[in-house]
Amino acid sequence: MATSVLSVRVNDEERSLLESASEQAHTNLSDFIRRKALDAAEIDALERRVVTIPARDWEAFEAWVHRPGQKIASLKGLARKPPKWK
């Protein structure tokens, strides 16, 4: 997989905090920042409240939404089981 450089500007205090956190995580600064940035990006993407559907796909989406529900045997059985925390 090809990689590319991403540059981020931080002040001395921010860099010190990031270096300290990366040491505590037993990783290097670059890997620490990359992992944390990707985690934050995934959370932001999953928390999106607005979903844009291209006009060309709208009819297919409406057909899917209005399709009758399907019974899924494995989910039916799962719904009968008591939760693990009980």
Image: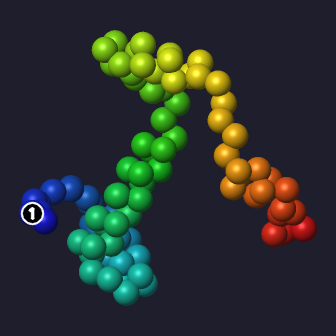
Q: Is residue 40 above or below residue 82?
A: above
For the C terminus, the quadrant is bottom right
Q: Residue at x 13, y 65 (%)?
A: 1
Q: Which residue is mark 1?
A: 2
Q: Is residue 57 above or below residue 17?
A: above
Q: Residue at x 33, y 72 (%)?
A: 32
Residue type at tag 1: Ala
Q: Residue at x 20, y 56 (%)?
A: 8
Question: Which residue is at the front of the view, 86 or 58?
Answer: 58
- Name the spot of residue 27 as percent of width and height, x first: 32, 83
Q: Residues within 10 Å of mark 1 (few under 14, many from 20)?
A: few
Drawn side of residue 84 relative to residue 61, left or right: right
- Name the spot of residue 18 as percent of width and height, x first: 35, 70
Q: Is residue 32 above or below residue 43?
A: below
Q: Secondary structure at mark 1?
A: loop
Q: How many marks?
A: 1
Quadrant of the rendered image containing residue 33: bottom left
- Name the spot of residue 39 as percent of width and height, x first: 41, 59
Question: Which residue is at the front of the view, 28 or 41?
Answer: 41
Drawn side of residue 82 relative to residue 10, left or right: right
Question: Which residue is at the front of the view, 56 or 67?
Answer: 67
Q: Residue at x 59, y 22 (%)?
A: 67
